[in-house]
């Protein structure tokens, strides 16, 4: 299960009550995206919630091609966001706090930790393959990315 399947709306019950309709708790669910980010959905929520949801939409759902929203584009942008937060030195708890403050979404710190650990393992595999293939550029790039994720020791 991808990390983006484990990103949830903060204050889900409050939002459902304001919308007067039920939506999935998962942020990247098609139904959630459709209802929340339609003009009608946004007009029904309070100002503070609307501002955060609009920030989320602007940062992750603003695609050049509107069909890209259903091709994994928002999820890839969100994954890059998580990796950037980690590269800034934030741990799983702090990453959850930041995403919650900025976008009114949350995840469990253990899920974020698992995602980061899997990312490191993937980069280690890329390193090994690049080494076997003699691709020095890719090897160096994978090492730098892994160092950003692991942080100082």
Image (cartoon, helix red, strand yellow):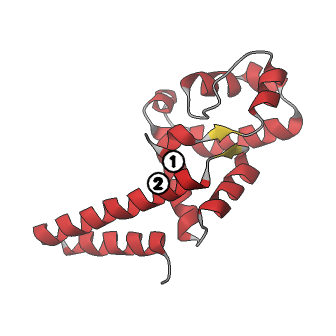
The reply to whether residue 57 is visible in this rendering is: no
Pinpoint residue 118: horizontal percent, then vertical percent.
39, 57
Q: Where is residue 4? Give x, y as percent.
A: 52, 42
In front of the other: 91 or 144: 91
Can I make out residue 126 in this image? yes
Along the horizontal axis of the image, is 148 left or right of 59?
left
**Cα gap from disc 2 to disc 1, whole angstroms:** 15 Å
Say whether residue 140 is left or right of residue 148. left
- Determine the residue positioned at 47% across, 60% down: 116
Question: In the rendered view, would you say 151 is above or below 104?
Answer: below
Q: Quadrant of residue 94?
A: bottom right
Label 1 sits on residue? 77
Q: Nearer the viewer, residue 71 or 110?
A: 110
Asked whether the beta carbons under mark 2 and mark 1 sit within 8 Å of each other, the answer is no
Query: Residue at label 2?
Result: 115
Q: Which mark is residue 4?
A: none
């Amino acid at each position: 299960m991808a990390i983006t399947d484990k990103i949830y709306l903060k204050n889900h019950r409050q939002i459902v009550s304001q919308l007067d309709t039920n939506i999935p708790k998962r942020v990247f669910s098609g139904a959630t995206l459709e209802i929340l980010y339609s003009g009608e959905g946004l007009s029904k929520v309070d100002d503070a919630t609307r501002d955060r949801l609009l920030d989320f939409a602007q940062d992750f759902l603003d695609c050049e091609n509107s069909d890209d929203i259903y091709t994994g584009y928002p999820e890839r942008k969100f994954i890059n966001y998580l990796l950037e937060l980690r590269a800034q030195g934030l741990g799983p708890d702090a990453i959850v706090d930041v995403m919650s403050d900025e976008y009114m979404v949350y995840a469990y710190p253990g899920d974020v930790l698992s995602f980061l650990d899997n990312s490191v393992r993937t980069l280690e595999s890329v390193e090994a393959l690049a080494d076997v293939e003699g691709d020095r550029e890719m090897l160096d790039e994978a090492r730098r990315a892994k160092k950003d994720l692991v942080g100082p020791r």
